[in-house]
Image (tube, rainbow, N blue to C red):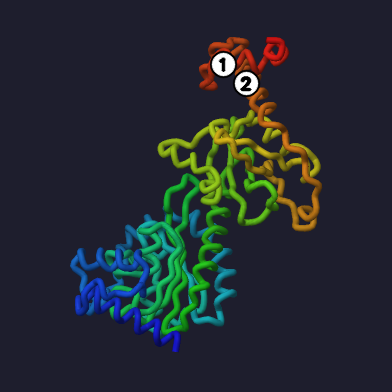
């Protein structure tokens, strides 16, 4: 009964928004706002819901170039797709990987090639963008840049109303959208929980792609009190000079100031109020628990960080479970250490150090001479 009511509500929404049979104010909250926006875009592009999409493939030269450009993404995603295939093999859903334009670059799972509806979707090189096949999880995830779920008639074309799909965008280490991951079923029961599965799988792909890049230090980040060492961590990769070379989406959520650097990746000292060498020093400690440090942000908030050198691994669950809490270094001490380093880098020139830190010369003197400040 619930499934029947759901399809009836979707049908009413289609009549209202796609065919205009009812006044718009009569529409109940039966479809999400992003679906309505996608439907409107399809209509504005001249599509009609009663016409069937063609499922065109890109040209051979464009396909060759697309696969070359996305070779690293496909390699990073393949183990995840294989795990996904095992997880969904009894559900009649399958996985599709596309580039940032919605072109299929890899697939996995129980695909019935004798079913033309499945075969059309899963040919390498098929263009599944919104402009070509209307509203789908693929086009929506690439447009909305967030995980989505849609069922049957929530697709724009009537010919695609047999599909149910979940999708999540994939972000490169520099933050740009590089593609998306989709789970699709044909004439299957609605499984909105697949949005969570596809989101987690997208996160695994992003992390694998990030960690596959050369780096001098990888820093796992989380809020204080949470365990570090799983795929819910924020990840930052640094070069030997402390410049950030890449970050995953969780790190970008923990450090929203990263978004301000649209044309370059920042130095970690622009995010953390401590000398970056302290992270490398922590990574060299022999005990895993001793590597975990609290790092102050310039906003006044704190994160806990687990710095790891190449070849070092995150702690196992047994190593992470009950570890004694380490005393946090006071923020003033960290700021003083940062000021001392700036003065050292400036070879004792306080004016130059103050200018580099963006503080007054008096502040530098006060932090470096606390005894005189107390006497005054």
Q: Quadrant of residue 340?
A: top right
Residue 339 is marked as: 2
Which class describes the residues within 10 Å of circle 2: few (<14), some (14-19), or many (20+)? Answer: many
Q: Mark 2: which secondary structure? A: helix
Query: Residue 366, how many percent across, how many down?
Result: 64, 15
What residue lies at 64% left-to-right and 26% top-to-bottom?
335
In the displayed structure, would residue 263 be above or below residue 204?
A: above
Q: Quadrant of the N terminus?
A: bottom left
Residue 322 is marked as: none
Which class describes the residues within 10 Å of circle 1: few (<14), some (14-19), or many (20+)? Answer: many
Q: Quadrant of residue 76?
A: bottom right
Compare residues 361 and 55 and report the one nearer the observer.
361
In the displayed structure, would residue 198 be above or below residue 366?
A: below
Query: Residue 58, how many percent across, how many down?
Result: 31, 64
Query: Residue 22, how many percent across, how many down?
Result: 21, 78
Residue 156 is left or right of residue 299, and the answer is: left
Residue ranking furthest to the bottom = 1
Residue 335 is left or right of residue 193, and the answer is: right
What residue lies at 62% left-to-right and 52% top-to-bottom?
233
Residue 295 is left or right of residue 73, and the answer is: right
Cα gap from disc 1 to disc 2, whole angstroms: 8 Å
In the displayed structure, would residue 140 be above or below residue 229?
A: below
Query: Residue 85, how many percent across, how many down?
Result: 55, 73
Q: Are marks 1 and 2 in contact (CB under 8 Å)?
A: yes
What residue lies at 22% left-to-right and 79% top-to-bottom?
50
Earlier residue among tags 1 and 2:
2
Residue 277 is left or right of residue 39, and the answer is: right
Q: Which residue is mark 1?
A: 353
């Amino acid at each position: 009964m619930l499934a029947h009511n759901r399809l009836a509500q979707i049908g009413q929404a289609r009549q209202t928004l796609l065919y205009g049979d009812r006044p718009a104010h009569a529409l109940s909250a039966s479809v999400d706002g992003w679906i309505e926006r996608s439907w409107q875009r399809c209509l504005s592009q001249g599509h009609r819901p009663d016409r069937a999409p063609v499922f065109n493939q890109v040209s051979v030269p464009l396909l060759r170039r697309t696969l070359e450009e996305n070779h690293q993404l496909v390699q990073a995603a393949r183990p995840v797709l294989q795990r996904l295939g095992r997880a969904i093999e009894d559900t009649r859903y399958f996985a599709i990987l596309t580039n940032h334009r919605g072109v299929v670059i890899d697939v996995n799972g129980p695909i019935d090639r004798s079913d033309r509806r499945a075969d059309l979707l899963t040919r390498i090189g098929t263009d599944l963008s919104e402009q070509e096949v209307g509203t789908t999880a693929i086009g929506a995830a690439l447009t909305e840049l967030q995980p989505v779920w849609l069922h049957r008639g929530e697709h724009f074309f009537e010919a695609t109303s047999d599909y149910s799909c979940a999708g999540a965008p994939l972000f490169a280490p520099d933050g740009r959208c590089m593609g998306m991951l989709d789970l699709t079923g044909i004439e299957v029961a609605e499984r909105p929980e697949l949005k969570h599965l596809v989101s987690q799988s997208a996160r695994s792909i992003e992390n694998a792609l990030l960690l596959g890049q050369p780096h001098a230090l990888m820093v796992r980040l989380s809020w204080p009190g949470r365990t570090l060492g799983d795929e819910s961590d924020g990840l930052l990769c640094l070069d030997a000079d402390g410049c950030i070379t890449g970050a995953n989406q969780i790190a970008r959520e923990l450090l929203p100031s990263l978004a301000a650097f649209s044309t370059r990746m920042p130095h970690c000292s622009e995010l953390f109020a401590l000398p970056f060498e302290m992270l490398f020093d922590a990574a060299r400690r022999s005990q895993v628990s001793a590597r975990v440090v609290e790092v102050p942000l310039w906003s006044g908030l704190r994160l806990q960080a687990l710095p790891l050198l190449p070849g070092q691994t995150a702690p196992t669950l047994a190593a992470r479970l009950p570890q004694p809490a380490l005393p946090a270094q006071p923020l003033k001490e960290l700021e003083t250490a940062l000021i001392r380093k700036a003065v050292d880098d400036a070879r004792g020139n306080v004016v130059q150090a103050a200018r580099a830190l963006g503080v007054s010369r008096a502040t530098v003197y006060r932090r470096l001479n606390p005894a005189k400040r107390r006497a005054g």
